[in-house]
Amino acid sequence: EQKRIVAKIEALMERIRRAKKLREETKRDTEKLWQSALAETFPRPGADLPKGWKWVNLGEVAVHRMGGTPKTEIAEYWYPLEIVWVTPEDLEKGEITRITKSKRMISRMGLQSKGGKLFPPKTVMLSTTATIGKVGIAQTEVFANQQITGIVCKEELLDPLFFGYTLLCLGDELKKLGGTSTATHINQDRLSNIIIPLPPLSEQKRIVNQLEALQDKIKALKEAQKETEEELKRLEQSILEKAFLGEL
């Protein structure tokens, strides 16, 4: 009877292992789908552009500056909690984070200690030190630490969401600009000289709508994959419980 139960458990667990393997393959394919969509949308530097598009330096279509960190030993710079203070930890990998809050906040006095100038809503927040290439868009006035560069687009030329997706596509190129040392960093001059594709504004908005719709579908797929993972875990536990209750 023991051997029969063991054989039944192993057969069922093998089915679960196969299901998990398929789930992992699907998960990788989902990630590839998103990266493929970005690569097909945004021409690489030096490539021929569609009619009406042109190559521009970032400094031609946006202004940018780094954030800063108030002195941690001065309590008044950190309390009361008044201002969203963005760090790379607040940004997700591989997608545009809509920034409405942060894990840490600073006071208005803390902001004044670093120049007193907030980043306005729609500022594109890019991690340019250490973890290079995370992207967010401020939904409210925010500040950031020195690992983040806030990029304010000239909206008559460049849609912030379009630019955010451009940065996601440039991920590996941005990391190269950071150098190969342990403390990687993209300085502000290099950032100004990044070359990006610039289609007409109407085309930018069409592309954004298309990518947003695709990302919604991918998020739904990822959520379904997560639910499947949880179901497989519950199934494993259920099999073991039934085995030792004599119900297999």
Image: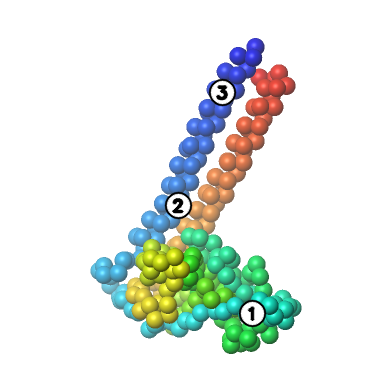
> What residue is at 48 percent from the left and 70 percent from the top?
129
Q: Is residue 153 left or right of residue 13?
A: left
In percent of width and height, residue 172 lies at: 38, 63
| Label 1 crowd bin: few (<14), some (14–19), many (20+), radius 10 Å | few
- Circle 3: residue type: Glu
- Tell me: residue 118, above or below residue 24: below
Tell me how far mark 1 sits from mark 3, CA to CA.
58 Å
Residue furthest to the right:
80
Classify mark 3: helix, strand or loop. Answer: helix
Discs 1/3, front = 1
Classify mark 1: helix, strand or loop. Answer: loop
Q: Mark 3 points at which residue?
A: 10
Residue 31 is labelled as: 2
Q: Mark 1 points at which residue?
A: 71
Question: Which residue is at the front of the view, 159 or 248?
Answer: 248
- Circle 1: residue type: Lys
Residue 125 is labelled as: none
Classify mark 2: helix, strand or loop. Answer: helix
Discs 3/2, front = 3
Name which quarter of the figure residue 53 lies in. Answer: bottom left
In percent of width and height, residue 137 lies at: 54, 72
Tell me how far mark 3 sits from mark 2, CA to CA.
32 Å
